[in-house]
Amino acid sequence: MIRLPERFRELGFDAIELEPTITDDDGQSRRESLRLLIVTDLENLIQEAIEIARWHADHGTPENQKFFDFCIQMLPYVGACDKIDPVNERRFDAKSFNHSPDFREMMRMTNSRHLPQSERLKRFVTDDHRFDQNSFEEARYQTPEIIMPFDEARYVAFRDNLLDEMVGVRAELEKSATDTVRAEAHGWLRDPKAPKKSKKKAKKILDAEDVFEVCPELYDAWDEIEQMLMKTALRIETERTLPFENLLRPASQILADVTELSASENLQSDDPVEISDDQLHRFLDVDSAVEVVKRIIDVESDHPESMGDQAQKLMIEAVQSKSPDELWEALEWFCENMVNRNECIRLLAREAEWILHILLELALIERYVEIRPELSRAERRLFHFMYRRSPWFNDRIPALDQIGTGFLFGLDDEHASLVIGVAGYRGDADQTTELKTRWKAFIGLYPFWLELLRSQDTERKSRRKSEAMTPEIEDDLGCDDPRDLIDMHLPRELVDASIESVQILAEQYCTATQRPIIVGRFVDRKTQDELAIEFGVSQQAISRTLKSGLDQIRNGLFQDQKVESANDSQRSA
């Protein structure tokens, strides 16, 4: 980080000094110097964004008030589905190309071993790789596809109904929190031993119309409670609908067959989707409908109160009468109410995250206005590129997204110079096209890269577990502190040695095979598993090489009479 005016730090910014190589239109290259601003207080930024939304909800135009009221209602659902809709947030690391045997094989097959990291991206992803507006979602979410149980209009109605219900819950929570805080304030005033500071705050609480303005920390507790309620609702929804899961497909298929046959007859009608009574009686498969409704009743008897008494009565009457109208009503109710709506909640949570980025952008703009005079033109453009919502990232802010920052600055210096040239210096059309090409390749490679690293992590954990269960192949090189490693394997005279001295000893006494492994373990502090992957050998081979290398150092020091022998060292200890 570099020195910045104090006002920058007050506004939650730090900076990295960059010196990119910029290519002019005439092909001439030059070195530039500029600052890349980094947000250091994301939590405070989020609170500022929420305050902006509240201000607009209270003081904006009627249209703005409606939108920002909606934003405030949606915000508690950010992260509400982290367990059923996990996000990929591992930042891309180009160094893994060199450490992973799979990537090394890909580099061999694509003849890209000696190419820059950014060029490898384009070699790894074929030209016919599909890229569209869903590509970012496929990279960001572990389960990108959302299978909606009903159409958009019904989803909007579901979302509005849920938000309205939560308004009532929020009002109850607010009243409960207010009553609790006021009661505690009265207790402070009555307590003769209460500190003056507490009594002073108690008076402010009792005089305030809105307790939340005096105790803003209540908002955090409030949001946590709402998220807890949402997660509980997700669990209850799954438990309620899971027993009926296998019946939804046959029930919805019966309804779909009637709708499709009726629509084919109504092609010339003003309303082709309307189903007449005659069509319902002709096209509904009564026997199949009765069979499905009977199965619904049987499942409900094993899980009482899943549907409610009214719905159960509707099902029983439909089976008894075998009336197409009543069977249709029963099946339609079942398909609308017993479908798992967690997919709707997943979509709602994603919309909430999108809304959060809208508000964060507003908060960042307010901060930007204050520091703009002290930024160069290139720094201003770079700020806008990094901290404004981008269509490349599905209207997310690139600098606040791990996938975004991994692409922009997770490759090599040449790629970073291209990013800065396009963003800060308005690179030419060829540079912009090149950056877009790399982005498409990156977003196509990222899910594969992530899956590969996950499998390697799983394999590494499995190896460690196996090592723990088989002591005969385990060694004593599991310490985290290199000084402990020195103490365990080298003479006592080297206990206080620096890590750098180990590298010198390795160069002096170890063989060409032992040297990089000794340095990798003791100086770079890599695990044996990581070294095994890097050198393409087994963990046991790494263990043997480490032991033999340490023996080489110990024996060499003794022969040079720089330390006492290993036996003497042990006796003196």
Image (spheres, rainbow, N blue to C red):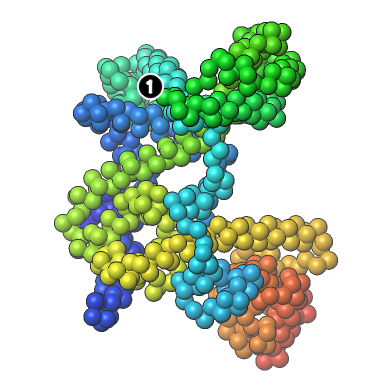
Q: Residue at x 55, y 57 (%)?
A: 447
Residue 469: % across, % down = 81, 57
Horizontal side of residue 197 vs 307, given as left or right: left
In the image: residue 473, left or right of residue 285:
right
Q: Nearer the viewer, residue 177 or 83?
A: 83
Residue for badge 1: 194
* Res 204 quadrant in image: top left
Q: Quadrant of the N terminus?
A: bottom left
Q: Position of residue 375 (x, y in %)?
A: 20, 60
Q: Residue at 61% of width from left, 84% of height from top?
A: 505
Which residue: 69% across, 18% down? 286
User: How many numbered dots are placed on residues in this image?
Assistant: 1
Residue 454 x/y as whole percent: 62, 57
Q: Nearer the viewer, residue 234 or 488?
A: 234
Q: Is residue 28 visible?
A: yes
For mark 1, give the secondary structure: loop
| Amino acid type, residue under disc 1 in the picture | Ala
Sort mark 1 into few (<14), some (14-19) or many (20+) by Cα contacts within 10 Å. few
Q: Is residue 423 above or below residue 9?
A: below
Q: Quadrant of the C terminus?
A: bottom right
Picture coordinates of residue 93, whole percent (x, y): 51, 65
Can the viewer see residue 521? Answer: no
